Protein backbone atom coordinates (compact mmCIF):
# COMPACT_ATOMS: atom_id res chain seq x y z
CA UNK A 1 0.00 0.00 0.00
CA UNK A 2 1.40 3.39 -0.93
CA UNK A 3 1.82 6.15 1.63
CA UNK A 4 -0.81 8.87 1.64
CA UNK A 5 0.37 12.44 1.97
CA UNK A 6 -2.30 14.66 3.53
CA UNK A 7 -0.97 17.81 1.85
CA UNK A 8 -0.29 16.38 -1.61
CA UNK A 9 -2.40 17.15 -4.64
CA UNK A 10 -3.37 13.95 -6.37
CA UNK A 11 -4.03 13.51 -10.05
CA UNK A 12 -7.73 12.87 -9.42
CA UNK A 13 -8.10 16.24 -7.64
CA UNK A 14 -7.13 18.06 -10.82
CA UNK A 15 -9.39 16.05 -13.11
CA UNK A 16 -12.70 17.50 -14.13
CA UNK A 17 -15.75 16.25 -12.28
CA UNK A 18 -18.03 13.85 -14.09
CA UNK A 19 -21.29 15.45 -15.10
CA UNK A 20 -24.55 13.85 -14.00
CA UNK A 21 -25.18 12.13 -17.33
CA UNK A 22 -21.71 10.57 -17.49
CA UNK A 23 -21.96 9.45 -13.89
CA UNK A 24 -25.40 7.87 -14.27
CA UNK A 25 -24.38 6.04 -17.46
CA UNK A 26 -21.33 4.54 -15.76
CA UNK A 27 -23.28 3.75 -12.59
CA UNK A 28 -26.01 1.99 -14.56
CA UNK A 29 -23.47 -0.43 -16.03
CA UNK A 30 -22.01 -1.10 -12.60
CA UNK A 31 -25.49 -1.71 -11.18
CA UNK A 32 -26.00 -4.44 -13.78
CA UNK A 33 -22.75 -6.05 -12.64
CA UNK A 34 -23.77 -5.76 -8.98
CA UNK A 35 -27.00 -7.62 -9.76
CA UNK A 36 -24.93 -10.34 -11.45
CA UNK A 37 -22.75 -10.49 -8.35
CA UNK A 38 -25.85 -10.75 -6.17
CA UNK A 39 -27.19 -13.71 -8.13
CA UNK A 40 -23.79 -15.41 -8.16
CA UNK A 41 -23.39 -14.98 -4.40
CA UNK A 42 -26.81 -16.56 -3.84
CA UNK A 43 -26.06 -19.37 -6.29
CA UNK A 44 -22.66 -20.26 -4.83
CA UNK A 45 -23.48 -19.51 -1.20
CA UNK A 46 -20.65 -17.00 -0.92
CA UNK A 47 -20.15 -14.85 2.17
CA UNK A 48 -18.84 -11.32 1.56
CA UNK A 49 -18.11 -8.70 4.22
CA UNK A 50 -17.18 -5.16 3.16
CA UNK A 51 -15.87 -2.65 5.71
CA UNK A 52 -16.13 1.08 4.97
CA UNK A 53 -13.99 3.42 7.04
CA UNK A 54 -12.65 6.92 6.52
CA UNK A 55 -12.71 10.49 7.68
CA UNK A 56 -15.96 12.34 8.43
CA UNK A 57 -17.36 13.63 5.16
CA UNK A 58 -15.34 11.22 3.02
CA UNK A 59 -18.47 9.76 1.42
CA UNK A 60 -18.99 6.37 3.06
CA UNK A 61 -22.77 6.73 3.14
CA UNK A 62 -22.94 7.90 -0.46
CA UNK A 63 -21.00 4.96 -1.84
CA UNK A 64 -23.04 2.48 0.20
CA UNK A 65 -26.25 4.01 -1.19
CA UNK A 66 -24.83 3.78 -4.71
CA UNK A 67 -24.04 0.09 -4.18
CA UNK A 68 -27.43 -0.83 -2.71
CA UNK A 69 -29.65 1.28 -4.97
CA UNK A 70 -30.62 -1.56 -7.36
CA UNK A 71 -30.01 -4.74 -5.39
CA UNK A 72 -31.94 -6.76 -2.83
CA UNK A 73 -31.68 -5.69 0.83
CA UNK A 74 -32.05 -9.37 1.70
CA UNK A 75 -28.70 -10.06 0.07
CA UNK A 76 -26.93 -6.71 0.54
CA UNK A 77 -27.33 -5.95 4.25
CA UNK A 78 -26.12 -2.59 5.57
CA UNK A 79 -24.91 -2.55 9.18
CA UNK A 80 -24.49 0.80 10.96
CA UNK A 81 -24.39 0.12 14.68
CA UNK A 82 -25.25 2.82 17.25
CA UNK A 83 -23.10 3.60 20.26
CA UNK A 84 -22.60 0.53 22.45
CA UNK A 85 -24.89 -0.10 25.40
CA UNK A 86 -23.53 -0.51 28.92
CA UNK A 87 -23.82 -4.29 28.51
CA UNK A 88 -21.94 -4.20 25.18
CA UNK A 89 -19.21 -2.07 26.75
CA UNK A 90 -18.51 -4.94 29.13
CA UNK A 91 -18.13 -7.48 26.31
CA UNK A 92 -15.08 -8.34 24.25
CA UNK A 93 -14.81 -5.31 22.00
CA UNK A 94 -15.45 -6.99 18.65
CA UNK A 95 -18.22 -9.20 20.06
CA UNK A 96 -21.15 -7.01 19.08
CA UNK A 97 -20.06 -6.97 15.44
CA UNK A 98 -19.69 -10.73 15.03
CA UNK A 99 -23.44 -11.58 14.89
CA UNK A 100 -23.74 -9.35 11.82
CA UNK A 101 -21.16 -11.20 9.73
CA UNK A 102 -22.62 -12.72 6.55
CA UNK A 103 -24.18 -16.15 6.22
CA UNK A 104 -24.12 -18.03 2.91
CA UNK A 105 -25.60 -15.97 0.09
CA UNK A 106 -25.16 -12.62 1.84
CA UNK A 107 -23.10 -9.48 1.33
CA UNK A 108 -22.74 -7.36 4.47
CA UNK A 109 -21.69 -3.71 4.22
CA UNK A 110 -20.38 -2.19 7.46
CA UNK A 111 -20.87 1.59 7.59
CA UNK A 112 -18.05 1.93 10.11
CA UNK A 113 -17.04 -1.19 11.93
CA UNK A 114 -14.88 -2.59 14.70
CA UNK A 115 -12.25 -0.15 13.50
CA UNK A 116 -14.04 2.55 15.51
CA UNK A 117 -11.66 1.55 18.30
CA UNK A 118 -8.62 2.35 16.15
CA UNK A 119 -10.08 5.69 15.01
CA UNK A 120 -12.76 7.76 16.67
CA UNK A 121 -12.63 6.00 20.06
CA UNK A 122 -8.89 6.39 20.27
CA UNK A 123 -8.72 9.98 19.02
CA UNK A 124 -11.64 11.14 21.17
CA UNK A 125 -10.28 9.24 24.19
CA UNK A 126 -13.30 6.95 24.57
CA UNK A 127 -10.82 4.16 25.14
CA UNK A 128 -7.36 4.07 26.67
CA UNK A 129 -4.16 3.80 24.66
CA UNK A 130 -3.68 0.34 26.16
CA UNK A 131 -7.13 -0.74 24.88
CA UNK A 132 -6.37 0.69 21.43
CA UNK A 133 -3.05 -1.16 21.22
CA UNK A 134 -4.61 -4.42 22.38
CA UNK A 135 -7.22 -4.04 19.66
CA UNK A 136 -4.65 -3.31 16.94
CA UNK A 137 -2.55 -6.31 17.97
CA UNK A 138 -5.51 -8.67 18.22
CA UNK A 139 -7.77 -7.76 15.31
CA UNK A 140 -5.54 -9.28 12.57
CA UNK A 141 -5.96 -12.68 14.27
CA UNK A 142 -9.73 -12.23 14.49
CA UNK A 143 -9.86 -11.25 10.82
CA UNK A 144 -7.74 -14.25 9.90
CA UNK A 145 -10.29 -16.49 11.64
CA UNK A 146 -13.10 -14.70 9.77
CA UNK A 147 -11.39 -15.23 6.42
CA UNK A 148 -10.53 -18.85 7.21
CA UNK A 149 -14.22 -19.46 7.93
CA UNK A 150 -14.91 -18.70 4.26
CA UNK A 151 -15.77 -15.00 4.40
CA UNK A 152 -14.41 -12.73 1.66
CA UNK A 153 -13.34 -9.69 3.70
CA UNK A 154 -12.78 -6.38 1.91
CA UNK A 155 -11.66 -3.24 3.78
CA UNK A 156 -11.92 0.24 2.23
CA UNK A 157 -10.60 3.50 3.64
CA UNK A 158 -12.07 6.62 2.00
CA UNK A 159 -9.65 9.54 2.15
CA UNK A 160 -10.50 13.19 1.52
CA UNK A 161 -8.28 16.28 1.63
CA UNK A 162 -8.74 18.91 4.41
CA UNK A 163 -10.24 21.58 2.14
CA UNK A 164 -12.81 19.24 0.64
CA UNK A 165 -13.75 17.89 4.06
CA UNK A 166 -14.32 21.45 5.28
CA UNK A 167 -16.49 22.24 2.26
CA UNK A 168 -18.63 19.13 2.76
CA UNK A 169 -19.11 19.62 6.49
CA UNK A 170 -19.99 23.29 6.01
CA UNK A 171 -22.57 22.32 3.39
CA UNK A 172 -24.37 20.26 6.02
CA UNK A 173 -24.90 23.20 8.35
CA UNK A 174 -27.54 24.95 6.23
CA UNK A 175 -29.02 21.97 4.38
CA UNK A 176 -32.07 20.47 6.07
CA UNK A 177 -31.46 17.18 4.25
CA UNK A 178 -27.96 16.83 5.66
CA UNK A 179 -28.02 18.45 9.11
CA UNK A 180 -28.49 15.04 10.77
CA UNK A 181 -25.07 14.06 9.42
CA UNK A 182 -23.35 16.76 11.52
CA UNK A 183 -23.22 15.58 15.11
CA UNK A 184 -21.48 17.26 18.07
CA UNK A 185 -18.91 14.45 17.79
CA UNK A 186 -18.16 15.44 14.19
CA UNK A 187 -17.50 19.01 15.30
CA UNK A 188 -15.15 17.88 18.06
CA UNK A 189 -13.27 15.48 15.80
CA UNK A 190 -13.00 18.01 12.93
CA UNK A 191 -10.24 19.94 14.71
CA UNK A 192 -8.14 16.79 15.24
CA UNK A 193 -7.13 16.16 11.64
CA UNK A 194 -3.58 15.06 12.37
CA UNK A 195 -4.55 12.97 15.39
CA UNK A 196 -6.75 11.02 12.96
CA UNK A 197 -3.87 10.86 10.48
CA UNK A 198 -1.59 9.32 13.10
CA UNK A 199 -4.28 6.87 14.20
CA UNK A 200 -4.97 5.89 10.59
CA UNK A 201 -1.29 5.35 9.84
CA UNK A 202 -0.80 3.07 12.83
CA UNK A 203 -4.00 1.21 11.95
CA UNK A 204 -2.68 0.56 8.45
CA UNK A 205 0.70 -0.51 9.79
CA UNK A 206 -0.72 -3.17 12.11
CA UNK A 207 -3.88 -4.35 10.32
CA UNK A 208 -2.96 -4.25 6.60
CA UNK A 209 -2.40 -8.00 6.28
CA UNK A 210 -2.07 -10.46 3.42
CA UNK A 211 -5.42 -12.01 4.32
CA UNK A 212 -7.27 -8.73 4.97
CA UNK A 213 -5.53 -5.81 3.25
CA UNK A 214 -6.70 -2.21 3.26
CA UNK A 215 -7.58 -0.45 0.00
CA UNK A 216 -7.52 3.36 0.01
CA UNK A 217 -10.05 5.25 -2.11
CA UNK A 218 -9.36 8.89 -3.00
CA UNK A 219 -12.78 10.49 -2.49
CA UNK A 220 -12.04 14.15 -3.22
CA UNK A 221 -14.40 13.64 -6.16
CA UNK A 222 -17.47 11.81 -4.85
CA UNK A 223 -18.74 10.49 -8.18
CA UNK A 224 -15.40 9.13 -9.31
CA UNK A 225 -14.82 7.61 -5.87
CA UNK A 226 -18.13 5.74 -5.99
CA UNK A 227 -17.51 4.38 -9.46
CA UNK A 228 -13.91 3.43 -8.71
CA UNK A 229 -14.79 1.68 -5.46
CA UNK A 230 -17.67 -0.29 -6.95
CA UNK A 231 -15.50 -1.30 -9.91
CA UNK A 232 -12.77 -2.48 -7.55
CA UNK A 233 -15.25 -4.39 -5.37
CA UNK A 234 -16.59 -6.21 -8.42
CA UNK A 235 -13.06 -7.14 -9.47
CA UNK A 236 -12.43 -8.87 -6.14
CA UNK A 237 -15.04 -11.60 -6.62
CA UNK A 238 -15.04 -13.87 -9.65
CA UNK A 239 -18.59 -14.39 -10.85
CA UNK A 240 -20.20 -15.83 -13.95
CA UNK A 241 -23.43 -15.15 -15.79
CA UNK A 242 -26.08 -17.61 -14.69
CA UNK A 243 -28.46 -19.05 -17.30
CA UNK A 244 -31.92 -17.54 -17.09
CA UNK A 245 -35.09 -18.62 -18.77
CA UNK A 246 -36.71 -16.06 -21.00
CA UNK A 247 -39.28 -14.24 -18.91
CA UNK A 248 -42.81 -13.80 -20.22
CA UNK A 249 -45.66 -12.41 -18.20
CA UNK A 250 -48.56 -14.86 -17.83
CA UNK A 251 -52.12 -13.94 -18.77
CA UNK A 252 -54.20 -12.35 -16.05
CA UNK A 253 -57.19 -14.24 -14.76
CA UNK A 254 -60.67 -13.11 -15.85
CA UNK A 255 -62.70 -11.09 -13.33
CA UNK A 256 -65.52 -13.65 -13.29
CA UNK A 257 -67.94 -12.45 -10.59
CA UNK A 258 -65.57 -9.99 -8.90
CA UNK A 259 -66.99 -6.49 -8.29
CA UNK A 260 -65.24 -3.51 -6.67
CA UNK A 261 -66.26 -3.01 -3.03
CA UNK A 262 -68.98 -0.50 -2.18
CA UNK A 263 -67.08 1.06 0.76
CA UNK A 264 -64.55 3.86 0.31
CA UNK A 265 -60.94 3.77 1.51
CA UNK A 266 -58.74 6.56 2.76
CA UNK A 267 -56.35 7.73 0.06
CA UNK A 268 -53.22 9.84 0.14
CA UNK A 269 -54.03 13.44 -0.89
CA UNK A 270 -52.65 14.23 -4.34
CA UNK A 271 -50.76 17.39 -3.45
CA UNK A 272 -48.31 17.03 -6.34
Image (cartoon, rainbow, N blue to C red):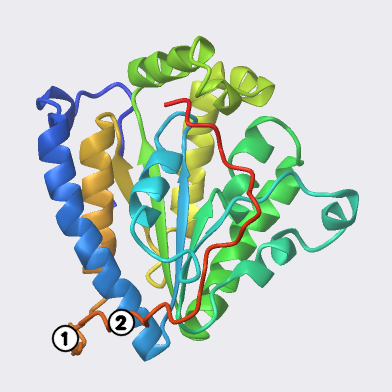
Residue placed at 36% from the left, 89% from the top? 44
* Looking at the image, residue 154 lies above or below residue 244: above
Q: Which residue is mark 1?
A: 246
Query: Local crowd at mark 2 within 10 Å, few (<14), some, or many (≥20)?
Result: some
Residue 115 is left or right of residue 212, and the answer is right
Which numbered tag is attached to residue 167? none
* Looking at the image, residue 64 lies above or below residue 272: below
Q: Where on the picture, by quarter, is residue 24?
A: top left
Name the element at disc 1: loop
Disc count in the image? 2
Q: Are marks 1 and 2 in contact (CB under 8 Å)?
A: no
| Relative depth, front residue between 177 and 59 | 177
Name the element at disc 2: helix
* Looking at the image, residue 213 lies above or below residue 121: below
Residue 23 is left or right of residue 6, and the answer is left
Q: Where on the picture, by quarter, is residue 268?
A: top right
Query: Local crowd at mark 1 within 10 Å, few (<14), some, or many (≥20)?
Result: few
Residue placed at 66% from the left, 56% from the top? 135
On the image, the x and y values in percent for residue 260 come to 53, 63
Residue 123 is left or right of residue 255, and the answer is right
Residue placed at 45% from the left, 29% from the top? 57
Quadrant (top left, top right, bottom left, bottom right) of the C terminus:
top left
Residue placed at 40% from the left, 33% from the top? 58
Residue 16 is left or right of residue 65, and the answer is left
Distance from the alpha carbon under mark 1 to that under mark 2: 18 Å
| Relative depth, front residue between 230 and 212 | 230
Of the two numbered discs 1 and 2 in the rendering, the one whose residue sits closer to the viewer? 1
Which numbered tag is attached to residue 40? 2
Amino acid sequence: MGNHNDESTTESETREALNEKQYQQALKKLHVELVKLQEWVKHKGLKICVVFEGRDGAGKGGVIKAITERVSPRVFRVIALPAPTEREKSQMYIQRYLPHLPAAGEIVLFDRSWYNRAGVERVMEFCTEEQAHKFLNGVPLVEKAIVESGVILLKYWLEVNPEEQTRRLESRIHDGRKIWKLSPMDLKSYSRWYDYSRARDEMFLTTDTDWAPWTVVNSDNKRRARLNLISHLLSQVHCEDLPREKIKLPKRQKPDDYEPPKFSCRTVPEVF
